[in-house]
Image (cartoon, grey):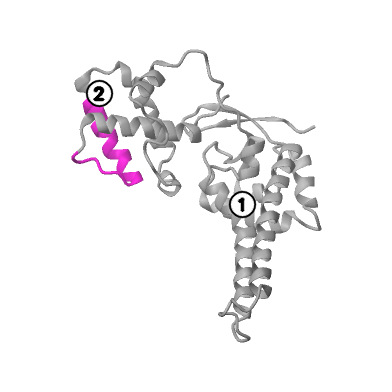
Amino acid sequence: MNQEQTNIKTPEFVSIQFQLAGVGSRAAAFFLDTLILTTASFLILLTLFLILYAGSEFWFLSDTLSSGPVAITIVLLFLLNWCYFFLMEFFAGGRTIGKKVVGIRVIQENGHSITLLSSFIRNFLRIIDSLPASYFLGIIMVFFHSKHKRVGDLVAGTIVIHERRAKNTKKSSPLEKEIQMRGLSSDSLPIDQWSLKSIGNKEWKLLQTYCNRFLHLKDEVKDRRTKQIAEILLPKIGLEVTGKTYQQLENELLVLYLILKDEWEFEL
């Protein structure tokens, strides 16, 4: 019988337990993603049909250029169906739309977020997992493997887990109250997903430690720590440090903490 949980030891020698996603949840996510891709592909093909047959008002469709829209459509369909999983899993923290709805995500076997290379490998190998038809090999692998891995997961070193966020408690923590009092939210600091990928586990631990001790630091110590950590983290996400007050730097670090918390923290 397959184990439903796995223990991971991080480089910091912390043991974390994750609940593995099985055939049912992964199939449900894949069905939703397939439905989205099918709908998008249909709309692209419908647009092509309208362009080719709507009438003579499409002056640019001469006999010599009629192959242009067809070629563009083929390229769009290829990019949509081959890049959707690869790009979504990397830029959305291991979640496609289907995975997000079902509540599962892809991570590295060491507990870290999926890398660009791992995302490419696991999704490129869908070619093998889909053999001989209807994703048969992938389903068999997930069902019988002890960690519910398909071929792509084995080669890329990834696992798929259930994502269960910590439940909201009736009382907000002192840090949460401080953030609310400052009127901050995760939308207060527009940061693109590519920039966030420059923040690794080491940087997250540094920021997490700073925020956990934030309210207990004396003002002079807080200002010094804020400046030091801001100079390390903010340039990584394309933000300037010079010319800003300690209050502004604190706010940006607190917002960055809110954004990264969804990426790095799990309910164990």
Determine the secondary structure under disc 2: helix
The image's mark for residue 222 is 2
Q: Amino acid at mark 2?
A: Lys
Number of marks in the rendered image: 2
Taking 132 as reference, is 60 above or below it? below
Sequence-first disc among 2 and 1: 1
Q: What is the magenta range?
A: 223-243
What residue lies at 35% left-to-right and 26% top-to-bottom? 183
Q: Residues within 10 Å of mark 1 (few under 14, many from 20)?
A: many
Residue 81 in sight: yes
Question: Closer to us: mark 2 or mark 1?
Answer: 1
What residue lies at 23% left-to-right and 17% top-to-bottom? 218
Task: Name which quarter of the figure residue 68 lies in.
Answer: bottom right
Q: Nearer the viewer, residue 209 or 253?
A: 253
Across and down, in percent, residue 47 comes to 64, 65
The image's mark for residue 48 is none
Q: Nearer the viewer, residue 168 or 183?
A: 183
Across and down, in percent, residue 17 comes to 60, 27
Determine the secondary structure under disc 1: helix
**In the image, residue 42 lies in the stretch drawn in magenta:** no
Report the quarter where the N terminus lies.
top right
What residue lies at 50% left-to-right and 36% top-to-bottom? 263
What residue lies at 68% left-to-right and 69% top-to-bottom? 49
Residue named by callout 1:
85
Q: Amino acid at mark 1?
A: Phe
**Alpha-carbon span between mark 2 and mark 1:** 42 Å
Task: Name which quarter of the figure residue 216 lies in.
Answer: top left
Report the quarter where the C terminus lies.
top right
Main secondary structure type of the part rendered in magenta: helix
